[in-house]
Image (tube, rainbow, N blue to C red):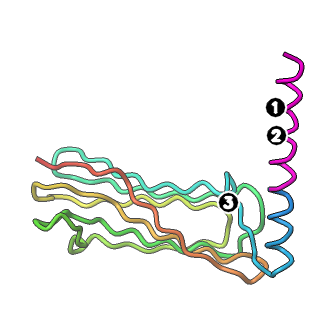
Amino acid sequence: MKHIVTVLLAVIVSFTAMSINVAADYSQRGIIIVNDIGSAQKDSMLSIDGKNATCTSTYYLRYGEVSKVFVTQVLEKKTNSKSFSAVHGARWTQSVQSNRLGVTNTKENLSSGVYRLKTVFTVSYANGKSETITVYSAERTVK
């Protein structure tokens, strides 16, 4: 039993050492490794009440400095070809100079079909870099 535990520990330690060496090798070659695990909360939510849609998008960066967050919300409807297209009059934009953004918009009198909310966040960081993140809501049905 001791022998099995010893071998298992040796294997775990060797895999850990290999992953550290691989990460170091990438950074020495100028390849940036990005870990976005939990650094920002990004949500795109669609709720339907009868024939009316409420579109809510939120962004919150827990760590780091943001100089500007620009958001575009687009309500989309599923077409016959199973792809989505933008709903006329259901596109909204807003920006803030903060690490926190919350946007809610509504669209009334929707026709029957399947809808989703597409939210595009463009985030400019204090260090001059920026990124664009697209988040889709769950699909919702209007009857």
- Which quarter of the rendered picture does the N terminus lie within? top right
* SS for dot 2: helix
Image position of 66 with respect to 139: above or below: below
Q: Amino acid at mark 2?
A: Ile
How far apart in space, not on screen, are marks 2 and 3 (Cα)? 25 Å
Q: Earlier in the sequence, mark 2 or mark 3?
A: 2
Q: Amino acid at mark 3?
A: Asp
Say which residue label 3 marks.
36
Q: Kindly report which numbered mark, 2 or 3, lies closer to the viewer in this rendering.
A: 2
How far apart in space, not on screen, are marks 2 and 1 (Cα)? 6 Å
Question: What segment carries the magenta color?
Answer: 1-18
Residue 36 quadrant? bottom right
* SS for dot 3: loop
Say which residue label 2 marks.
12
Could you say where residue 28 lies in the image, as x and y percent from the top left?
86, 77
* SS for dot 1: helix
